[in-house]
Image (spheres, rainbow, N blue to C red):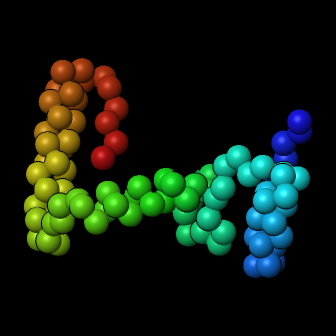
Amino acid sequence: MAGIGIQVMNPGGWEKLHAMVKSHEIDILNPTLPDNAGLPGVPMSVDDFENWLVTAENSDTLTLQQAQEKWNLRFHTIQQNLKNHSSDSPNSLIYA
């Protein structure tokens, strides 16, 4: 059997595809969500999207202040590592 990639341009196209699946004319191997242009790269499958939602709903949240504090700590750690690296090898170029 041959596989092809398609883009459904008409909302009614999904119903036609599902009718073809029910009549065993085609099989949809990797269903993806329509109209998810906000996501970069390869479209996310429905299962992956549902798992992402569950994970997001069950994840701990941070206040904006907590996020800024974590970023500042990491930023200063990176800066310190760069300073230590540049003093180890004076001929290396460090761009910050």
Q: Residue furthest bottom?
A: 11
Q: Residue 72, located in which quarter of the rendered image?
A: bottom left
In front of the other: 1 or 60: 1
Residue 64, given in percent of the width and then of the height, sits at: 17, 72
In the figure, residue 86 lies in which quadrant?
Answer: top left
* Residue drawn where x is 77% and y is 72% of the image: 15
Rendering coords of residue 78 (x, y %): 20, 42
Query: Is residue 76 visible to us here?
Result: yes
In this view, the residue farthest toward the front is 23
Query: Which of the two residues, 74 or 59, is positioned nearer the viewer here?
Result: 59
Q: How many marks?
A: 0
Q: Position of residue 52 (x, y in %)?
A: 40, 58
For this view, does 67 lie left or right of residue 18?
Answer: left
Report the quarter where the N terminus lies: top right
User: Is residue 8 in sight in this rendering?
Assistant: no
User: Vertically, is 63 above or below 51?
Assistant: below
Residue at 88% x, 53% y: name it.
25
Q: Is residue 13 left or right of residue 35?
A: right
Residue in view at x 17 percent, y 26 percent: 87
Residue 13 placement, left or right of 55: right
Q: In x, y percent, where is residue 74?
A: 16, 48
Q: Nearer the viewer, residue 89 or 6?
A: 6
Residue displayed at 89% across by 39% down:
2
